[in-house]
Image: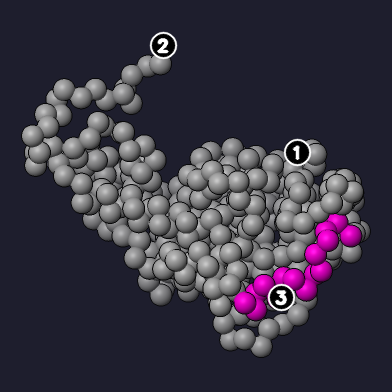
């Protein structure tokens, strides 16, 4: 618990002054003020985190936390549980969704086994598990509170390693059959939302499985009674080891001043759990895309962060992260290479700053 408490207490507020520098610089560039929208907003937020003079996205990585879930026994998916392991085994080959996009984006991948049912012999699948999957949340708590904190701290340690290796930004992804079920259960418990609003289709469910999935989450909430507003209690009772480790990774990255990119539903729920433990984490987060999972919309609304891309994605893995890395790179490049009004024949005095206008 000391690692978690100390890390939470070490997180600093981002610099509003550095953000102002970035905004003023954008306003000096040859374009109507604010007309590049999210591109400008993202660089201003980056400047708050990294400093205006340190805006670079050269070294980037997605951390993938892999774990299995005991709720698989409830027959709520068509996929075999070993799929988690099989995907982890090929994640570095460039053959998965995340692997292929990362290869194109020039970003790295780091895979952590935080609770798969089978252990890899590969050195690039880092074994950090304490158990071979969680308990079945439809019958028992997923894990002990002690194990939950331990896994959160595992995520913190992973973040520290990423920071120490000089990465400029990190994405947070996952692998885990049935982890949309545990995610829905944690969200329902954490925010007091009915399962009908948090349970989605996941990666592979029939209509009958979908209905059973809702019933399973309701049962898990009823049996385990997770405490509203308590991230650790909710994860330990109805969550997964992947969610715990991801939560910790967000906390660790914020503590080291590293911007973190959210992927989809599971990733956004873990981010919400981290922000619940320390609200300062929020200012270090960027949401990559609007997930097709209904619960993801609740997560981003609770976080108060608007996802940048809307591409109807629901793969997971961290696949949205390298896409946003490239968007951020593009935003920084534009900012640093666009001409100023003083370098053109354009008189900026004639332009209206529509950001200051009130809608009729």
Say which label, 1 or 2, has the lower sequence index.
1
Q: Residues within 10 Å of mark 2 (few under 14, many from 20)?
A: few
Using the image as rendered, state which of residue 189 and residue 181 is in the foreground: 181
| Residue matched to label 1 | 197
Q: Disc 2 on helix, strand or loop?
A: loop
Residue 75 appears at what percent x and percent y?
89, 60
Q: Tell me whether circle 2 and circle 3 mark residues in contact (CB < 8 Å).
A: no
In magenta segment, residue 273: no
Q: Which mark identifies residue 176? A: none
Residue at (70, 76) in percent of width and height: 86
Residue at (84, 51) in percent of width and height: 206
Using the image as rendered, state which of residue 181 and residue 186 is in the foreground: 181
Residue at (65, 39) in percent of width and height: 298
Please report the bounds of the magenta region as a residue range.
Answer: 75-90
Q: What is the distance, in whole Å, between disc 1 and disc 3 at their CAs?
A: 29 Å
Using the image as rendered, state which of residue 140 and residue 72 is in the foreground: 72
């Amino acid at each position: 618990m000391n690692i978690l408490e100390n890390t939470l207490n070490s997180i600093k507020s981002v610099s509003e002054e550095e953000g102002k520098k970035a905004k003023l610089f954008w306003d000096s560039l040859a374009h109507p003020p604010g007309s590049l929208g999210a591109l400008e907003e993202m660089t201003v937020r980056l400047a708050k985190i990294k400093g205006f003079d340190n805006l670079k996205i050269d070294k980037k990585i997605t951390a993938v936390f892999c774990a299995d879930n005991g709720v698989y026994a409830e027959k709520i998916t068509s996929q075999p549980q070993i799929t988690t392991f099989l995907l982890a085994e090929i994640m570095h080959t460039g053959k998965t969704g995340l692997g292929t996009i990362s290869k194109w984006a020039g970003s790295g991948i780091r895979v952590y086994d935080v609770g798969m049912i089978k252990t890899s012999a590969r050195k690039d699948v880092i074994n950090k598990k304490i158990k071979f999957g969680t308990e079945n949340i439809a019958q028992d708590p997923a894990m002990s509170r002690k194990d939950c904190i331990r896994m959160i701290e595992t995520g913190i340690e992973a973040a520290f390693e990423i920071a120490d290796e000089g990465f400029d930004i990190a994405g947070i992804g996952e692998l885990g059959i049935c982890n949309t079920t545990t995610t829905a259960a944690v969200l329902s418990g954490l925010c007091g939302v009915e399962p009908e609003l948090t349970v989605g289709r996941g990666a592979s469910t029939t209509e009958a499985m979908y209905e059973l999935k809702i019933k399973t989450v309701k049962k898990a909430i009823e049996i385990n009674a997770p405490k509203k507003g308590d991230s650790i209690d909710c994860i330990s009772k109805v969550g997964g080891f992947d969610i715990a480790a991801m939560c910790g990774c967000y906390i660790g990255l914020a503590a080291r001043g590293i911007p973190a990119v959210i992927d989809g539903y599971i990733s956004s729920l873990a981010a919400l759990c981290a922000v619940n433990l320390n609200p300062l984490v929020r200012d270090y987060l960027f949401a990559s895309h609007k997930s097709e999972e209904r619960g993801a919309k609740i997560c981003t609304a609770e976080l108060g962060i608007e996802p940048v891309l809307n591409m109807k994605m629901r793969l997971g893995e961290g696949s949205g992260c390298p896409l946003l890395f490239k968007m951020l790179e593009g935003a920084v490049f534009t900012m640093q290479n666009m001409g100023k009004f003083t370098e053109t024949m354009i008189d900026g005095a004639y332009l209206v700053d529509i950001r200051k206008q009130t809608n009729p």
